[in-house]
Image (cartoon, coloured by chain):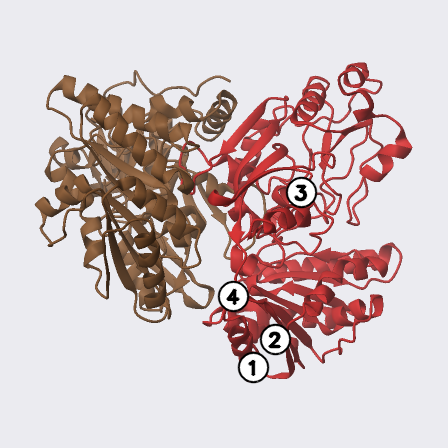
Chain colours: A brown, B red
């Protein structure tokens, strides 16, 4: 299977006059204005200085930009809010940056069918708020919901805290509008719950990280806001493995949480030093979560009792969501410390105790501290390494991440649950995918983007 | 975008000795033995007499068969139990039939991760029974669950009665083993709830109707059997539109059913004359359904109360599932009457009253009776036309189906919810898909099956 034509070795000085004429002030050439759009929130470096930035305000703008890039064999990076963590949205040298941030309208909430049509650049929390006016909510809930965009969530299938109860973002996407590599516009999916008309292009584009097309709008599925007042709970454990065992038991028990998160001792310490909230640093780890519904209080009690049975030394049930707020501060707190070498592995929930034990062993053996926060209920871990400064420190930290990733795979897990591959994890792909699956991925990429202009050399 | 090479005009007398040598008695040449494997349960006719039948017992058998077919440019049809309703599994003239019926082992139930590994030819109800030994169940529940196979369910994304509460079959598939057109074997998906490693090939193959590869085994997601005793309920309505309005209200209300089905008066009459169970024929339609969980009785009462508010004239709550049994007899009862001209449209649930009203209008105007059963809770209707015998009658009935299909589309619906396109609905594809989406479908098909041997000229 041959690789798609690579766009590298592009010609400099391409004629961008057509783009200026079509897009006016929405096509930006000033490097200083482009710079803030040239990288995501990860440690990955942009591949070089972009040729221009398209501040798209419509599908037609995106189509014009891609048709131009296709004709001129120009690499394109695509971004919502730039909260990505794998370098997937970083600019290419001589490339075009397409920003969806101005396409930020909630087009329609169809309450009686529990659907919403939304442009890709809508901030996730804004969509959720618009739905709540109708007694509905948007289930995906990335920790960065107040800044990330729906289009970015869909492009990496990033779901965050509520996936344990509502499934991944893909489960909330009924259809998409997509601009293909050559500028053609396509609609996928249907307004019905069931639909088996042709291949499931919607699911193909969810998680495709900007490599197959640019998602410009989405038809998303909503759920009714549960009745009653939610409860939050926390449980402190002296040993992180016990917390892992408790999670496995909770997930397989009758009292289901809407959210079930784990913060190990080091991550609580990092969050508390960033913005103190009075949380006691646990000996090993703290579980925090939320229950909803008319029986939220009973559910929280049952979950806390399970925690106690697995060794929790201190538990609390609350009617506020301060505990979850602390969890949401994890990324800003890590950023404030300059900690960027992290991973996003997943394991089957029954393997949680084992993966935490193994991470402790790796940390000890390689002599670097690792902080872990986890969407524990679905087995998705975000581990960050404290690295000494300098290239040697970085290399050591990368080695820790590689070992954690191989550990997760050995337990039946995945190299990325929701951050995607981007540029940072591309070397790990063959660790998980068999060679035939990789060939199939690349043949699909070549079929849809024969010139290889869309987010080249990333994701697959 | 060019079409894939068509396998037609194949050479007769191809050398099948290699297949006999590789497969022994599992390669069948006797036309009488092949005949029962040459068609599905629909009105579609096989395209001709097959060259041979492969009774695969392993992935290696399927791989050998496809490698041979690829080398010899021979069209392949794939079948589980032959319960399909669109001609998708019908044999091709000079083609190979690959049957998965002997690959019928439940390989493993991983209770603590709520996963099962299962060969494609396992009968759906058998998988469900194996899971129930572990306190778990397999959510998809096609009306033909006691005879259809898991592989067939996945190939058409057929989910049946419980989709209203548990989602479609795609939502229950975590990974697949697939044999590609040239015999290569690939694994997709992961054991983790979250996974965003490369494109979602699992979802691409779900619903691909045998056109991209042959699914040989699946990793499926299970759910815990709800505690308590389920309740079934029924509500009779004088007008089918009122029943539709009641369904919309129930689905948007707080008391969620696990199953919510509608049978119109004619379909109840057909089922009762096939196997009398004492059901009273309703004036317009009957809703039947099931609630589960510790509050099953309260939920059933709330649902029945909603039905009464929307005009139900007679309601009942029961602890037996006789009402659902009647619903499951719909297809055998229609078959016994020789009624095969049917459709599988879907509409958004808020459009149910309108679609039923429209079907009545079409039936009156064209002078043919239409019976409808519906997975009403997810807006999926199976309508069957009573046609006079002979080609004129068939043509009139097909016209009714076409009009119902266009009506569903006009209401934001779909041409097929779970039966797939097969050969029977291929002319309807451009009614729903835009031309760009059709081109993309075909470019994916060409990338994965460049010689066009897998279920050619069907599905897309």
Q: Is residue A87 visible?
A: no
Circle 2 packing at 10 Å, graded few (<14), some (14-19), many (20+), is many
Q: Earlier in the sequence, mark 4 or mark 2?
A: 2
In the rendered image, which quarter is residue B72 located in? top right
Alpha carbon distance from label 2 to label 3: 31 Å
Q: Which chain carries label 2?
A: B
Foreground tag (3 vs 1): 3
Q: Do labels 2 and 3 share a chain?
A: yes
Residue at (35% x, 69% y) in the render: A134
Decide: is A265 above or below B197. below
Label 1 crowd bin: few (<14), some (14–19), many (20+), radius 10 Å:
some
Q: Label 1 marks which chain's residue?
A: B
Inter-mark Cα distance, 4 to 2: 25 Å
Please tell me in which quadrant of the rendered image residue A41 appears. top left
Q: Disc 1 marks which residue?
A: B310
Q: Are marks 2 and 3 in contact (CB under 8 Å)?
A: no
The chain under label 3 reads B
Q: Are marks 1 and 2 in contact (CB under 8 Å)?
A: yes
Q: Which mark sits nearer the N-terminus, 2 or 3?
A: 3
Q: Closer to the observer: label 2 or label 3?
A: 3
Query: Which type of secondary structure does the marked residue at label 2 adopt?
Result: helix
Residue B243: mark? 2
Decide which of A141, A278 is in the foreground and name it.
A278
A46 on left or right of B407: left
The spot of residue A315 in percent (x, y) is 24, 57
State the separation of the CA atoms marked 4 and 1: 25 Å
**Front position in the image: B360 or A300:** A300
């Amino acid at each position: 299977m041959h690789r798609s034509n690579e766009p590298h070795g592009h010609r400099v000085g391409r004629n961008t006059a057509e783009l200026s004429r079509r897009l006016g002030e929405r096509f930006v050439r000033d490097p200083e204005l482009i710079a803030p759009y040239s990288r995501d929130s990860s440690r990955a470096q942009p591949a070089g200085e972009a040729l221009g930035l398209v501040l798209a305000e419509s599908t037609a703008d995106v189509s014009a930009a891609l048709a131009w890039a296709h004709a001129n064999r120009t690499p394109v990076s695509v971004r919502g809010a730039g909260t990505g963590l794998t370098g997937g949205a970083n600019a290419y040298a001589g490339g075009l940056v397409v920003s969806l941030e101005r396409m930020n309208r909630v087009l329609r909430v169809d309450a009686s069918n529990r659907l919403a049509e939304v442009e890709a650049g809508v901030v996730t929390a804004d969509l959720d708020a618009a739905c709540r006016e109708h007694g509905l909510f948007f289930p995906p809930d990335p920790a960065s919901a107040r800044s990330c965009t729906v289009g970015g969530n869909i492009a990496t299938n990033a779901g965050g805290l509520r996936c344990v109860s509502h499934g991944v973002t893909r489960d909330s996407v009924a259809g998409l509008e997509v601009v293909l590599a050559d500028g053609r516009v396509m609609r996928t999916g249907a307004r019905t719950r069931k639909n088996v008309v042709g291949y499931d292009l919607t699911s193909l584009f969810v998680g495709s990280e900007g490599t197959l097309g640019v998602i410009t709008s989405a038809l998303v599925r909503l759920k009714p806001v549960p009745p009653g007042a939610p409860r939050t709970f926390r449980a402190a454990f002296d040993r992180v493995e016990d917390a892992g065992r408790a999670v496995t038991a909770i997930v397989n028990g009758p009292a289901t949480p809407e959210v079930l998160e784990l913060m190990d001792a080091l991550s609580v310490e990092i969050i508390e030093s960033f913005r103190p909230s009075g949380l006691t640093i646990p000996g090993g780890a703290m579980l925090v979560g939320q229950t909803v519904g008319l029986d939220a209080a009973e559910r929280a009690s049952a979950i806390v009792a399970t925690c106690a049975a697995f060794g929790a030394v201190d538990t609390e049930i609350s009617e506020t969501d301060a505990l979850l707020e602390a969890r949401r501060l994890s990324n800003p707190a890590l950023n404030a410390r300059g900690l960027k070498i992290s991973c996003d592995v997943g394991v089957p929930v029954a393997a949680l105790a084992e993966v935490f034990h193994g991470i402790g062993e790796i940390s000890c053996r390689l002599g670097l501290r690792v902080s872990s926060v986890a969407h524990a209920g679905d087995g998705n871990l975000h581990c960050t390494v404290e690295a000494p400064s300098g290239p040697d420190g970085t290399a050591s930290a990368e080695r820790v991440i590689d070992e954690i990733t191989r550990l997760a795979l050995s337990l039946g897990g995945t190299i990325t649950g929701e951050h995607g591959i981007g540029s940072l994890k591309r070397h790990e792909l063959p660790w998980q995918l068999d060679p035939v699956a990789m060939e199939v991925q690349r043949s699909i990429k070549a079929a849809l983007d024969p010139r290889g202009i869309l987010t080249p050399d990333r994701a697959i």
